Image (tube, rainbow, N blue to C red):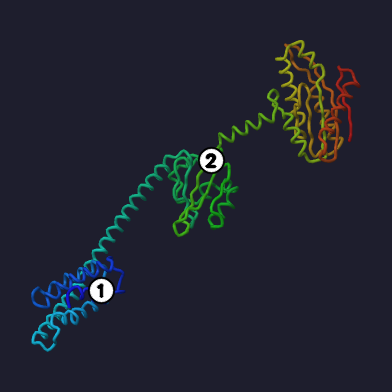
Amino acid sequence: MGSHELGVRWADALDGVVAPTLNRTQIEALLAGLSEQLLAALRGAAEVSVARIAASSLVAANYRDSAAVSRSVSMICRDMVDAVCPDRAEPEYERVRQRAIEVAGEFAAGFTATLRSTALAEQESTLVAALAAVREAQAQRQLSEARFAAVFAGASIGIGTIDADTGRVLDVNAAFAEMLGVPQERIPGRTVLEVLGADNIGPAYDRFRLLLLGQVDRFRIETRTTRPDGSHTDIDLSMSVVRDADGRVRFLIGVAVDITERKALADRLWHDAHHDNLTGLANRVLFFDRLAHATGPLGLCYLDLDRFKAINDAHGHTVGDRVLRTVAERLRTAAAPDGLAARIGGDEFIVLIENCTGRDQLAAVTDRLLTAVAQPVVVAGQLVSIGASVGTTLVDQRPQDVDALMHTVDSAMYRDKAARPREAPGTADHRR
């Protein structure tokens, strides 16, 4: 029996032990070569140590199961012995058999040693790769933390972190501390309630509580904070939960934007859009909005200035504007606290009284308005009497048809103007 046939038998014996890295033809060629070396060792033509090399070759080919050892030892002690000494009656048979046992022992020892060293090498390689990955992760984390620290410290928006278990502030940046008007170093370690104060935390308390309980992951709110010095800061606050890879809550993070100037600008724009730019009274937009949403009963006083055109023609629009501003301020004072005074165009003004108690209140407000307008105004160093015509109306409920209501009070005013001399201000009353 030659080495090639032994290689085929050996391959058959190892079939199914593992998934080797070689195909069948390559395995047979490998095992035939190893058989040649082992046969030489059995004949005494080579040292038994060649068995260790054979074992290492099998391990390298991915034969790492213990079954590979037992089946290979069987091949050495039976098939290879028969190949060297087919006749067991020959005097050499016992010597070959004894030599086979030594070769088999070397093979087993070599297989075990090679398998151990291979495993250790793989473990070392895995450990090195793992350590490299850890170092890389640490480096990336350090870089990420450094970037976050830079953003945290230098951001113009406020950033703060809060312990989800205790509700205590872990850290805040300078921008957040400045918004709150509290020194930055005094904030960490304190509860949110202690930092903001009971008055300030009120609007956001319920949402913040839900965040701590884990019932919501984020919220956003606009709130006004009173600083220790008494000044106010309007803040757009967003709070979010930060979780780890397993979904556990790590901490809460808050981002705050100071919107004080933006809100002030919005308030100014709203005021400008709803107030007369000459007199500062409510304009038509604000008046009709209030009228549409007013709570009845409602009283209306519609005033048209007497002799204003003559003043405008005689002294010019600059003086006329000054007269309108004076009259408007008087009407604002006279209407308070019961009514809203508005300029609806030219020299026409109107006062809205919500929750009007009745005709007596309407008459009292009307008298105050006429008395205020009747006071002389200084024009070009001279006292000039203005006066006004007025129409009033009283409705029990919020009007469904605003245009019809305005027509009613407008008509009442013009009837008053037509019914009396221009020099003497008077009133007309129309109840609806």
Is 293 on the left-hand or right-hand side of 363?
Answer: left
Q: Which amino acid type corresponds to the residue marked 2 in the rendered image?
A: Arg
426, 143: nearer the viewer? 143
Q: Position of residue 76 (x, y in %)?
A: 18, 78
The residue to which callout 1 is attached is: 11
**The N terminus is located in which quarter?**
bottom left
Q: Position of residue 78 (x, y in %)?
A: 19, 82
Check the image and report above or below for 3 versus 431.
below
Q: Position of residue 43 (x, y in %)?
A: 10, 78
**The C terminus is located in which quarter?**
top right
Query: Which of the 4 image quarters holds residue 394?
Result: top right
Q: Residue at x 29, y 61 (%)?
A: 126
Q: Residue furthest right?
A: 419
The residue to which callout 2 is attached is: 227
Q: Nearer the viewer, mark 2 or mark 1?
A: 1
Element class at badge 1:
helix
Element class at badge 2:
loop
Number of residues whose C-alpha sits closer than 10 Å to that of mark 2, classed few (under 14), some (14–19) or many (20 or more): some
Earlier in the chain: of badge 2 and badge 1, it is 1
Is 422 on the left-hand or right-hand side of 258?
Answer: right
Q: Position of residue 124 (x, y in %)?
A: 25, 62
Q: Residue at x 51, y 43 (%)?
A: 256
Check the image and report above or below for 133 versus 374.
below
Q: Is residue 66 visible?
A: no
281, 222: nearer the viewer? 222
Q: Which mark is residue 350?
A: none
Number of residues whose C-alpha sits closer than 10 Å to that of mark 1, classed few (under 14), some (14–19) or many (20 or more): many
Q: Which amino acid type corresponds to the residue marked 1 in the rendered image?
A: Ala
365, 59: nearer the viewer? 59
